Image: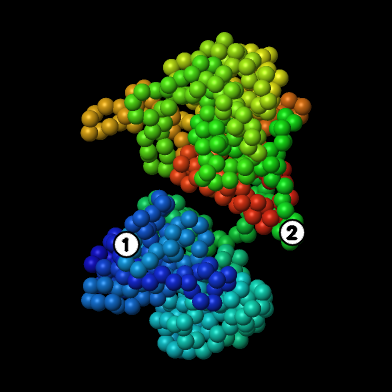
Amino acid sequence: MLTDCQGVPYPVYSCGKVVTCKIQKGAVPEGSVYLLRIRVPDSRQPFPGQFYMLHAKRSNVILSRPISVYHSQQASKTEVDVDFLILVKGKGTKELCSLVKDDEINVLGPCGNAFVNPADSSKKVLIVGGGIGVAPVAGFAETLPKKSYDFYASFKSGSYGLAYIKPASLVITTDDGSVGVHGMLPVALTEEALLKGNYSAVYACGPAPMLAYVKQIAEKNNIQCWLSMEARMACGVGVCLGCSIETTEGKKRCCKDGPIFDSKILKLEKPADSVGGVKVQPRKNPLADGEEPDLSVTIKGVKFENPVIGCSGTFGFGVEYSSVFDVNRLGGISSKGLTLEPRQGNDGIRVWETPSGLMNSIGLQNPGIPHFIENELPQMLALKPVTIANLSGSSLETYVEGAKLLDKTDVPMIELNISCPNVSAGGAAFGMSCSSAGTVVKAVREATKKPLIVKLTPQSPELVAVTLECIKNGADGISLCNSFQGIAIDIERGVPVFDKVKAGLGGPAIRPIAVRLVYEIVEAINKLPEEQRVPVMAIGGISCWEDAVEFIMAGATALQVGTSTFVNPNTMIEIIDGLKAFMKRKGYKSLADMRGIIQK
């Protein structure tokens, strides 16, 4: 067995199996905390305070999740059962808590250092756990002699994780008074109580404010204090340096140098009141019962009931999904890309799945604008969402002629597509430079009185300048970003997957880049005189309501959802419902209350 210089075994990568995964009783709300037991093919048991990196075999997340050991026991000579208390917080923890018996799970561990045993066994020690931080300190308490310690457990509501401890005294505090003392930890663990306990050491794990308080009162009274810290991790073995925390001895790796630290070297500063120069939003009261947030947006006089729009190229003409879900709940629908003449699109393979994304090379296959006006447009107008006609072309003349035809219809809005990457002429070629973009926008603007949204390509090397040129020439709004160009290769045949070699990439993989582009475009628009500012429709890898909130906070007025509809046809409905629930919880009465809040 390989060990480090302190005798702590190095972590081992193996595949474990789920023994049980069940809701932890006592946690409030019910189902917020799970007890996961994994059988690990390892003869050694973890030390108290250590953790494992957990990653389900069938997983939709990239990184393993670091979870502290709550309890362990030998299952056989070559296997150990390890228990974890897991708070359902994000995608990774939700995934872990949905595992069932015999599911395979990759485990790396045990990782990190362990709690240091009390130096003076003649005195009691104090153990403090806050929320899910109860798990590692309860695991440590279990290894200590019965009644050799006092235990304080602090929760928002309810209590859990105390099954294996045998303290001399157990004090539970809850914010809502549901169990034990009503209030936060300082209500019960006062400086007077600390001194009265005559403790030789303090061990704690929990939220940062709680740890700061424990550190303060322990050090003030010269009591040795050990704190279990947490930080976002990628590797768990000290190589990625993503979990570094500030100490008086410089940055330390939480996974390798910790997670247990002597409190004296830790810098537990108050949470920053700003990040990246942007002020942290003050907490608002939730909306009152029965009070509904206003999700509507208005663009150039056109009102959308909510900001969620079916994205052009991924939603047909809306009616195709009518039997799948209630499309009338959407704010709008942007049609398939339309050209003056009918098109058959590209030959060869047209779609290709990539990690967290989808490549496509459709080539603007469509029935042509005259056919659309006579056949598909009436069906779209019969739906409740705002109809947007996505206009493309192969030349300036075809763009203009298409705009003239659409101008004579009842379509409420036109989206000028100068961003399609999968055509030989027109499309993105017009959106690459200021001169070409300005020319086509000006010409189309003169051909129609309809509100005009210009859809831009992220491939432009001067995207901000192109945006401003489009606004200067009559754009009433901007939508971005269309797909990024990429290449896929058939390695068995040694040829490109797509006939045109390059194809458009969309899906969750591009979202962070799209958020940046929206942020930068909104930032540039906000520098214009107020009367010249136009709204931005965000596009790019939106797959859930959290993604939608990100774009809105970056400055987007509305958003279009594309690739994710192929994954889950109900995505847009779930985004609308999730957005509404988020706004109610956070006290946002309208989208304007949170739009652009990260803009400096």
- Is 205 above or below relative to 166? above
Residue at position x 57%, y 10% from top? Answer: 397
Give the numbered dot on residue 290.
Answer: 2
How far across and down, in percent of the image, does residue 500 sit?
A: 36, 22
Mark before the other along the chain sequence, 1 or 2: 1
How far across and down, in percent of the image, does residue 146 sit?
A: 44, 89
Would you identify the image quadrant in which residue 84 lies? Answer: bottom left
**Residue neighbourhood size for the residue with mark 2, other residues' Cα within 10 Å, grouped as few (<14), some (14–19), many (≥20):** few
Camera-side mark, 1 or 2: 2
Question: Can I make out residue 176 in this image?
Answer: yes
Q: Nearer the viewer, residue 429 or 560?
A: 560
How far across and down, in percent of the image, does residue 261 sit?
A: 47, 66
Residue holding disc 1: 104
Residue 335 left/right relative to 256 = right
**Residue neighbourhood size for the residue with mark 1, other residues' Cα within 10 Å, grouped as few (<14), some (14–19), many (≥20):** some
Picture quarter with the C terminus: top right
How far across and down, in percent of the image, does residue 484 sit?
A: 46, 30
Residue at position x 36%, y 23% from top? Answer: 347
Q: Nearer the viewer, residue 525 or 540?
A: 540
Residue at position x 60%, y 32% from top? Answer: 379
Residue 553 left/right relative to 34 = right
Q: CA distance from mark 1 to mark 2?
A: 45 Å
- Is 536 above or below relative to 338? below
Q: Nearer the viewer, residue 563 or 2?
A: 563
- Is 178 above or below relative to 400? below
Would you identify the image quadrant in which residue 260 lies? Answer: bottom left
- Is 308 above or below relative to 449? below
Q: Amino acid at mark 1?
A: Glu
Would you identify the image quadrant in which residue 402 lies? Answer: top right
